[in-house]
C-alpha cells in the first residue's frame, strides 16, 4: 500500500512538472496552448505577438482597418472590375484571404458580442452594478461596449461596400440589431 501511495505521489509530481513546463515560458518555446487562456509566466523579458486584441476601445480602429484593407484589394484588382462578374464579392473573398476576415464576418463578430451584451443588460435589476457573475462585466463596461458597437454598426450599415454584401441570411438584420442597441442605450441612459 505504501508503494502505491509513493507511486501516485511520484506520478502527481511528474504531471505537475510537465504542466509547469507548459505554462512557464522557457527559452526557445514560443506558443502557449490555446486552452491555457493567458496563463503563461515568462522567466525573462518577452515580447508577445497576438492577433486577438480587440475590445470596445479599439473596435472603431478595426472597422477602419477593414475598410482600408478592402480599398487596397479593390485597387489591386481594379483592372478586372468591368470584366469580372460579382467583382465586389470577389474583393471580399480576397480580403478575407489576406486579412482573415471580411465584412460579413465582421458583422457576425459584432452581432455575437452585441447579443451577449444585450442579454446582460436585460438581466440587470434596479440598482445592480454587476451584470453577471458568468462574464464578470460591470454595468458601465456593458453599456460602454454597447455604445461602441452601436457607433461602429451605424457606420457599417451606411458603408457602400457593406451594402453590397448579401445580408439576406443575417439574423437579425444589421439595421434591426442597431435599433436594439440604440434602444438598450436609451433605457440605460439614466444610469
Image (cartoon, grey):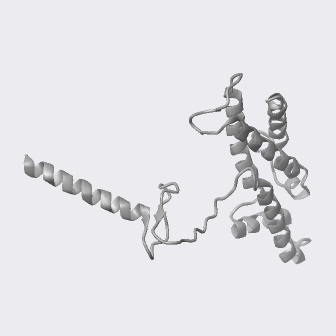
Does residue 125 appear to the left or right of 29 in the view shown? Answer: right
Q: Quadrant of residue 98?
A: bottom right
Q: How many labels does the image show?
A: 0
* Figure quadrant of residue 189: top right
Q: Is residue 124 visible?
A: yes
Question: Residue 92, how many percent across, how many down?
Answer: 78, 63
Identify which residue, 158 or 5, lies in the foreground.
5
Residue sitting at x 75%, y 60%? 102
Residue drawn at point x = 45 percent, y = 72 percent: 29
User: Taking the image as drawn, is residue 86 in sight?
Assistant: no
The C terminus is located in which quarter? top right
Place of residue 145 in the rendered image (x, y in percent of width and height, measured from the top left):
74, 44
Tell me what residue is drawn at x 77 percent, y 39 percent.
172
The one nearer the camera, 44 or 96, is 44
Residue depicted at x 70% and y 24%:
127
Outermost front residue: 44
**Residue 3 located left or right of residue 182:** left
User: Among all residues in the image, which is located at the extreme top?
Assistant: 126
Residue 111 position, x and y percent, is 73, 44
Percent position of residue 166, x then y: 81, 51
Name the residue nearer the viewer: 50 or 13.
13
Query: Vertical placement of 135 versus 153: above or below?
Result: above
104 w.r.t. 133: above or below: below
Quick one: 47 or 184, which is closer to the camera?
47
Amino acid at each position: 500500500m505504501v508503494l502505491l501511495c509513493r507511486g501516485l505521489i511520484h506520478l502527481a509530481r511528474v504531471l505537475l512538472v510537465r504542466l509547469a513546463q507548459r505554462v512557464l515560458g522557457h527559452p526557445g518555446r514560443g506558443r502557449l496552448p490555446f486552452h491555457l487562456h493567458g496563463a503563461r509566466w515568462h522567466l525573462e523579458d518577452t515580447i508577445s505577438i497576438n492577433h486577438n486584441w480587440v475590445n470596445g476601445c479599439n473596435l472603431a480602429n478595426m472597422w477602419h482597418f477593414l475598410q482600408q484593407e478592402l480599398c487596397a484589394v479593390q485597387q489591386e484588382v481594379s483592372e478586372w472590375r468591368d470584366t469580372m462578374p460579382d467583382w465586389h464579392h470577389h474583393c471580399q473573398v480576397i480580403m478575407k484571404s489576406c486579412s482573415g476576415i471580411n465584412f460579413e464576418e465582421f458583422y457576425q463578430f459584432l452581432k455575437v458580442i452585441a447579443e451577449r451584451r444585450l442579454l446582460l443588460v436585460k438581466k440587470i435589476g434596479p440598482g445592480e452594478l454587476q451584470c453577471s457573475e458568468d462574464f464578470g462585466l460591470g454595468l458601465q463596461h456593458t453599456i460602454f461596449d454597447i455604445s461602441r458597437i452601436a457607433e461602429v454598426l451605424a457606420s457599417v450599415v451606411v458603408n457602400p461596400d457593406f451594402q453590397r454584401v448579401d445580408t439576406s441570411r443575417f439574423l437579425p438584420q444589421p439595421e434591426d440589431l442597431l435599433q436594439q442597441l440604440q434602444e438598450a442605450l436609451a433605457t440605460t441612459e439614466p444610469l
